[in-house]
Image (tube, grey):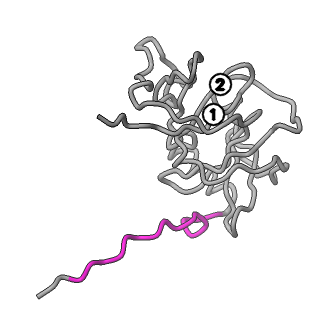
Amino acid sequence: MKTDMVKLVTFQLGLDLFAADVFSVERVLRYTSPSAVPDVPEWIEGVIEHRGQVIPVVDMRRRIGLGDFEITPDTRVLVLTTADGWVGAIVDAVHEVASIPATSVTQPPALFRGLSAEFVRGIAKVRDQLIVVLDVDRVLTSAARIAFDRASGAGEQSLPAVPAAPAVAARA
């Protein structure tokens, strides 16, 4: 019997380890300072250009309530693929792509409450460490996306298009 495996990109925020599904990570970029955008939530650092698209960049430490950080040579920007398009996520360091059995990812405990809990998809055990698996679709909520689009003067056309599935012609 074959065990279903999950691949997670593991990264660090402060002293804690987090992860995102490998299929949600478009790219890992070296940190470059984002261009500022006025009138957006304090956890949106600004924008960067990636593959011809202007994308919002979220300071993940601020977003989950860990506070400010110092940029180091290990700081990276994860380009995450969300339902609303690409979002950059500043993290302290990226560690590895870990392959683990799907059964190693469990639901978060019921006492996870508050703003930060809405980003948690589950808890994974990688080797002997517990890692918080984030729900990348909730990193930039719809309300924050609307505020970002208004402040940056961007409309729906600035978001990367997700290619539609090709139409299948019916055979007669």
Quadrant of residue 9 within the rendered picture: top right
User: SS for tag 2?
Assistant: strand
- Residues at marks 1 and 2, CA–CA distance in whole angstroms: 7 Å
What amino acid is labelled 2 in the image? Leu
Query: Farthest residue in the front direction?
Result: 1
For mark 2, what is the residue?
17
Quadrant of residue 153 within the rendered picture: bottom right
Asked whether, in this view, residue 172 is left or right of residue 151, the answer is left
Task: Give the total number of marks visible in the rendering.
Answer: 2
Classify the position of the N terminus by image quarter.
top left
Q: Nearer the viewer, residue 40 or 43?
A: 43
Residue 83: x %, y % from top left? 47, 52
Query: Farthest residue in the top direction?
Result: 111
Which residues lie in the magenta part? 154-169
User: SS for tag 1?
Assistant: strand
Residue 10's tag is: 1
Residue shown at 69%/58% (left/top)?
152
Residue 10: x %, y % from top left? 63, 33
What amino acid is labelled 1 in the image? Thr
Q: Is residue 136 above or below residue 66?
A: below
